[in-house]
Amino acid sequence: MPGRRPPRIDGFDYVGPHAYFLTICTFRRIPWFRDSVCAAETVSLLLRTATAYGFGVIAHCLMPDHLHALVDGTRPNSNFLKFVAMFKQRTAFTFARDRGQVLWQEGFFEHVLRSEDDLQGIAAYIVENPIRAGLCRDASEYPYLGSGRYTFEELADAVQIVPNWKSRRP
């Protein structure tokens, strides 16, 4: 049913040193992040909130109408649901204050990654997003992506890898 929040995994508490592939879409898929000030502020709040809530940002890419991020908990009490809620709250508040508009759609999508998942391959997939969308020819040209763990050279080497979680069926 449209408008419903994506479900979370039953019995999984989202706390601890787990890795997640996160996607958050803007309200009505409006391309708010074409605005460089809005985009830069959103990336800054992502990085600040991740640090405050005990998450490393392995890779992130802010597309015109959505965010992809690969994050991992760095502490035993790193709470993914609280981290995402606070990130969305901070960015939505700032956006509403400055523009009087709604920034995010309700909910978010996540893949809880397994230990055998290739984080570098998933990070490369995320960083390739603006290339696939035709926003740039090379990821180094796109200002709203990055990695706290891998260099662009390492990600470029991993681009040929198809992340194994994409072929998994629930």
Image: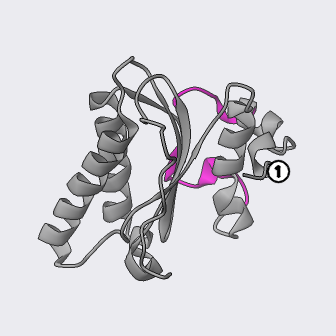
Residue at left offset 38%, top offset 49%: 43
Callout 1 environment at 10 Å: few (<14), some (14 to 19), or many (20+)? few
Give the camera-side residue of 108 and 12: 12
Give the camera-side residue of 101 and 43: 101
All told, the count of numbered labels is 1
> Does any portion of residue 99 appear in the rendered image?
yes
Residue at left offset 41%, top offset 71%: 26
Q: Is residue 36 left or right of residue 127?
A: left
Relative vertical location of residue 90 with respect to residue 73 in this rendering, above or below: below
Horizontal and vertical percent for residue 132?
73, 64
Q: In the figure, residue 80 lies in which quadrant?
A: top left
The span shown in magenta is: 137-153
Residue 141 among those drawn in magenta:
yes
Horizontal and vertical percent for residue 70?
55, 40
Horizontal and vertical percent for residue 36?
38, 64
Q: Is residue 121 left or right of residue 25?
A: right
Residue at left offset 75%, top offset 38%: 121
Relative vertical location of residue 55 with respect to residue 111 in this rendering, above or below: above
Residue at left offset 49%, top offset 53%: 144
Horizontal and vertical percent for residue 32?
38, 73
Give the camera-side residue of 113 and 23: 113
Q: Is residue 36 left or right of residue 11?
A: left
Q: Secondary structure at mark 1?
A: loop
Q: In the figure, residue 112 lies in which quadrant?
A: top right
Residue 82 among those drawn in magenta:
no
Question: What's the residue type where badge 1 is placed?
Answer: Ser
> Does any portion of residue 60 appear in the rendered image?
no
Per the image, the residue denoted by label 1 is 167
Name, please, the residue furthest toward the right: 160
Name, please, the residue furthest toward the front: 11
